[in-house]
Image (spheres, rainbow, N blue to C red):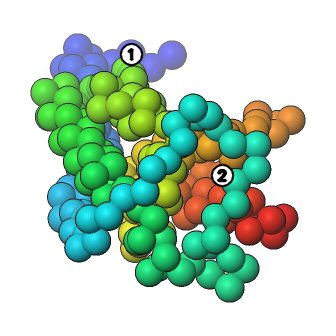
Amino acid sequence: MIKMSKNKKIIIGILIAVLLIISVVVVYKVIEKSVTNRADFNFKVDNNSSIPVDTVNNKEKEITWEEITENGVNEELILEKLDTQILEKIAKNLQDVMDEEIKDEQENPQILITEGWIRIFNKEKYKEIISIGKPAMKPLYYILYKSENNGLYEFLCAKALQEISGIGGEIADDGTMQWSTAKEYLELFTKKVTNDE
């Protein structure tokens, strides 16, 4: 057995501590970059019409939207049927959740390691989106459809749409979900709506 001097042990301990700090900073910066890219994600919708929506049933057994077909999304029609107030509320709530997440991570960089990012689903602004129920589905879909990104912001949209619609929430026998990214969920949801499965 090789004996190490006290100084060598201290140096090794310091090096390990520095490596841990560097790895936490790198993870933080990667997530911060993903989150910061969301700051310019604002919706401006000129059409202020809204249609009455049945809010009694929160989940649908089968969802069919004339705006989405095998030929793609009819953007004009989906905009006509969107409740723009709900769209704006969802976009604002999602941005608030992202801002709160940035603040949490800045105040406590260890939070990702100790609590993970799944805690976001317990944030009040996220729960408000879920509580909108069925009327939030098209706005959430529209946000996913229009976004060119596939980050945490979009993942929150996909998760909210999944929770409200009930589509894609099944867990496989191996414990995995049917989707892991927002774009995968968008594809899965679109196939379900167009009955193209």
| Residue 177 shows in the view | no
Question: Residue pushed farthest front?
Answer: 52
According to the image, label 1 marks what residue? 3
Image side of residue 10 versus residue 127, left or right: left
Q: Position of residue 61 (x, y in %)?
A: 76, 43
Q: Where is residue 142 in the image (x, y as percent from the top left)?
A: 44, 64
Find residue 121 and report its image quarter: top left
Labels in figure, total: 2
Is the residue 182 above or below the residue 19 in the image?
below
Q: In front here: 77 or 147?
A: 77
According to the image, label 2 marks what residue? 179
Name the N-terminal-most of marks 1 and 2.
1
User: What residue lies at 25% left-to-right and 58% top-to-bottom?
Assistant: 38
User: What residue lies at 32% left-to-right and 64% top-to-bottom?
Assistant: 49
- Disc number for residue 62: none
Q: In front here: 33 or 156?
A: 156
Crowd rating for badge 1 (residues with CA inside 10 Å; few <14, some 14–19, many 20+): few
Looking at the rendered structure, the kind of residue marked 1 is Lys
Looking at the rendered structure, the kind of residue marked 2 is Trp
Tag 2 secondary structure: loop
Give the quadrant of the C terminus.
bottom right
Crowd rating for badge 2 (residues with CA inside 10 Å; few <14, some 14–19, many 20+): some
Is the residue 22 above or below the residue 83 in the image?
above
Q: Position of residue 28 (x, y in %)?
A: 26, 43
Q: Which is more foreground, mark 1 or mark 2?
A: 2
User: What residue lies at 33% left-to-right and 49% top-to-bottom?
Assistant: 86
Image side of residue 107 versus residue 4, left or right: left
